[in-house]
Amino acid sequence: MTDQRKEPLEVCPGVFQIPAQRPSCHVYLIVGTYKIVMLDSGIDSSFGDLRDGLSDIGFTPADVDLVVNTHEHFDHIGGNKYFFRTAIIAAGRLAAAKITEKDAYVTMYSSFSADYRYTKPHLWFENGAFIDLENAKLEVIDTPGHTSGCICVYEEYNKLLFSGDTVFAHGTLSAIAPSGSAGDYVHSMDVLNTKKIERLFPGHGSLSQTPSEDIERASKNARTRLQEVKTGDTWSESTPLDEPGQ
């Protein structure tokens, strides 16, 4: 446990956020009737905090049945190795391909001395896949833009959206990293804008207090970003994020 570790939050019944400090991401735990799903696993060096957060909720890493990576970046997949032998690791098809092939440039592992072993997914999701937990039903939605492999997870019973790095509070978009696309971002935001979203849980920063308005704002931001790309004002991974702090 680090001095900066924040206590887990039960953001709604049976759904917990285990907050993270940069460069890691927030981890979400969805406690189903018979299975437990964890969304993202953070960086490998923050596993101690993740383990302690699970303990605070009343679980151990071995209790997690399924780990879903929202995309292929190191800060979302690094902890996979601690669940690899006891849980199913899953990601969208394009993210899973990059992780499996150890594409260190796209996953950004080339910039960090991290252990890449045992991060690859066992299960490759296609768009529209469902995870039925009985008390929760999770839909996998392809949302490329930040990277080509980004997905969001939508819980349809309670209208919850777990957005990874696709969209943050206030409608802020992430930077376009290698394999990402401004055009894809526009389409992804339009897809999300068709969903009724009552709670928005991003991979970084604060929780959204106005999810519908934030998704609408994100859709407009994506179109602005695409126009900037068309006119040569390129938005790349080197562009600082303007999302709120952790």
Image: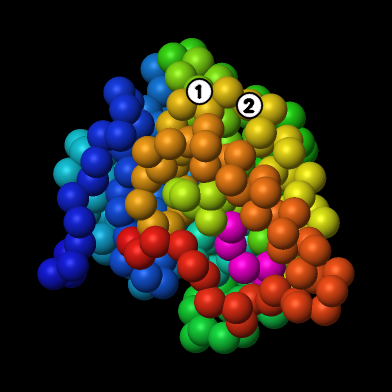
Please, what is the three-letter code of the amino acid marked with disc 1?
Lys
Q: Which residue extends farthest left? A: 3
Q: Residue at x 53, y 77 (%)?
A: 240
| Mark 2 vs mark 1, CA separation in Å | 8 Å
Image location of residue 17, percent across then percent down: 33, 43
Q: Residue at x 13, y 69 (%)?
A: 3
Nearer the observer, 82 or 140: 140
Nearer the observer, 48 or 173: 173
Residue 174 lies within the magenta run:
yes
Q: Residue at x 82, y 56 (%)?
A: 183
Query: Tag 1: Cα neighbours inside 10 Å, few (<14), some, or many (≥20)?
Result: some
Please, what is the three-letter code of the amino acid marked with disc 2?
Lys
- Determine which of the numbered discs, if any, sits on residue 56 in the image: none
Image location of residue 1, percent across then percent down: 17, 64
Nearer the observer, 167 or 119: 167
Residue 139 placement, left or right of 27: right
Residue range (magenta): 173-177
Residue 180 placement, left or right of 166: right
Image location of residue 43, percent across then percent down: 43, 67
- Residue 61 visible to an observer of this rendering: no
Q: Are marks 2 and 1 in contact (CB under 8 Å)?
A: yes
Query: Tag 2: Cα neighbours inside 10 Å, few (<14), some, or many (≥20)?
Result: some
Q: SS class of the residue under badge 2?
A: loop
Q: SS class of the residue under badge 1?
A: loop
Residue assigned mark 2: 195
Image location of residue 182, percent across then percent down: 77, 61
Residue 234 placement, left or right of 197: right
Residue 207 appears in which quarter of the rendering? Answer: top left
Count all numbered tags in the image, as a single digit: 2
Residue assigned mark 1: 159
